[in-house]
Image (cartoon, rainbow, N blue to C red):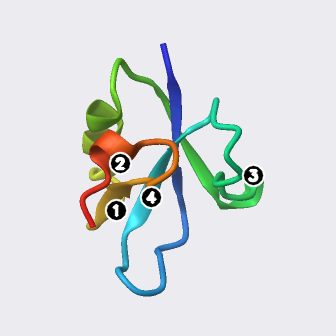
Amino acid sequence: MPYFTVNKNAQPNSGDHEVHDLASTRGCLPSVDNRTDLGEFASCSDAVTAAKSQHPKVNGCYWCAITCHTT
């Protein structure tokens, strides 16, 4: 099951905190200091829902959680 994290820092243009799959090898993961681990989820949509309890604006990463990327 994939393990997800959310970037503590919001994206400059959108204000979104991006959810990432830690198994990604695409170079898109935030630095360890800028991550909040979310845990294992069957899908990125479940991880995005969990991240919304911590941040008002959340989005899936375009590179490693594309099915949850909306903007």
Callout 3 secondary element: helix
Label 1, label 3: how many angstroms apart (C-alpha)? 18 Å
Q: CA distance from mark 2 to mark 3?
A: 17 Å
Q: Amino acid at mark 4?
A: Glu
In the displayed image of the protein, which residue is found farthest to the bottom? 13
Identify which amino acid the numbered label 3 is placed on: Val
Give the mark nearer the N terminus: 2 vs 3. 3
Measure how far apart labels 1 and 4 are at the Cα level: 10 Å
Q: What's the distance in space between the residues labelled 4 and 3, CA to CA? A: 14 Å
Callout 1 touching callout 4 (CB < 8 Å): no
Residue in the picture at 74% in, 58% down: 31
Task: Classify 10 Å Cα crowding around label 1: few (below 14), some (14-19), many (20 and above).
Answer: some
Looking at the rendered structure, the kind of residue marked 1 is His
Point out the frontmost of discs 2 and 4: 4
Residue 18's spot in the image, x, y percent? 44, 58
Residue 23 percent location from the top left of the image: 64, 29
Question: SS at mark 2?
Answer: helix
The quadrant of the picture occupied by the C terminus is bottom left
Q: Which residue is mark 2?
A: 51
Nearer-N-terminus badge (1/4): 4
In this picture, residue 4 sits left or right of residue 59: right
Q: Quick check: 41 above or below 6?
A: above
Residue 22 sits above or below residue 15 on the image: above
- Crowd around label 4: few <14 · some 14–19 · many ≥20 (10 Å): many
Instruction: Please report the residue visible at 29 percent of the width from the left and 45 percent of the height from the top.
Output: 68
User: Which is nearer the N-term, disc 2 or disc 4?
Assistant: 4
